[in-house]
Image: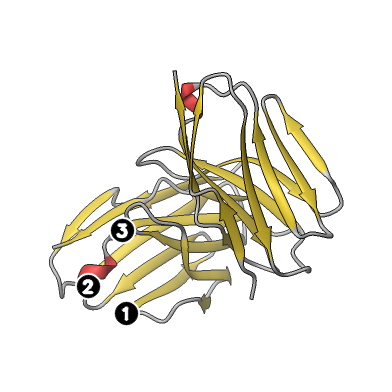
Amino acid sequence: GENVEQHPSTLSVQEGDSAVIKCTYSDSASNYFPWYKQELGKRPQLIIDIRSNVGEKKDQRIAVTLNKTAKHFSLHITETQPEDSAVYFCAASGYSTLTFGKGTMLLVSP
Amino acid sequence: SQTIHQWPATLVQPVGSPLSLECTVEGTSNPNLYWYRQAAGRGLQLLFYSVGIGQISSEVPQNLSASRPQDRQFILSSKKLLLSDSGFYLCAVREKGSYEQYFGPGTRLTVT
């Protein structure tokens, strides 16, 4: 089955800096790659996603890039703010289910 | 867009007691439904998913079971809870023909 590796497990940045979280996947048949943000005690929220026919997608301060050849994709957050502090999960989609990475705790210091 | 309800929001149960968690969905028909568990400080573990009424796929062998008695109702059960069953239980929905998957508000279960 699919295996998703996510790095780093923890990322600390200063407010205004950029943050990058990277994921790799194993199944070349995966074709959908979402990112979720989970604040403490709350449900994961879908923040951005990308399909395998697209190389990059942006939404304001966040962007996702996909390299199908290398089987890796990344989340980029620019101009980080304290409210960006949360756990971020990447995932890759098979036929019916998502396989999640183990998560990255992002800490943004004022 | 769909709305996902889960109850109860919080539950404290003794070891060996039964469990029933319910998830209902509004605003969509015949969705894919999923149960995940998240242990404290950990990732998202897929427990069960269903593509239709009465159709359940199990991802991890355990003392839990799931049922889908109605199109938009998904139930997670156990006959006897273990301490290791403690966690945050999340129901998720994906509409047929769509890629996006959305999570419900979750049930926080503590087994004592």
Helix or strand or loop: what does disc 3 sit on? strand
Helix or strand or loop: what does disc 2 sit on? loop
> In the displayed structure, would residue B108 be above or below residue B14?
above
> In the displayed structure, would residue B47 be above or below residue A6?
below
Asked if the residue at tag 2 contacts the one at tag 1, i.e. Cβ–Cβ closer than 8 Å, the answer is yes
Which residue has dot 2 on it?
A: B81
Rounded to the nearest angstrom, the CA distance separating label 3 from label 1 is: 14 Å
Helix or strand or loop: what does disc 1 sit on? loop
Which residue has dot 1 on it?
A: B63
Asked if the residue at tag 1 contacts the one at tag 3, i.e. Cβ–Cβ closer than 8 Å, the answer is no
Which residue has dot 3 on it?
A: B87
| Whether residue B100 is visible | no
Neighbours of disc 3 within 10 Å: few (<14), some (14-19), many (20+): many
Disc 3 marks a residue whose amino acid type is Gly
Chain to which mark 3 belongs: B
Q: Is residue A14 left or right of residue A60?
A: left
Neighbours of disc 1 within 10 Å: few (<14), some (14-19), many (20+): few
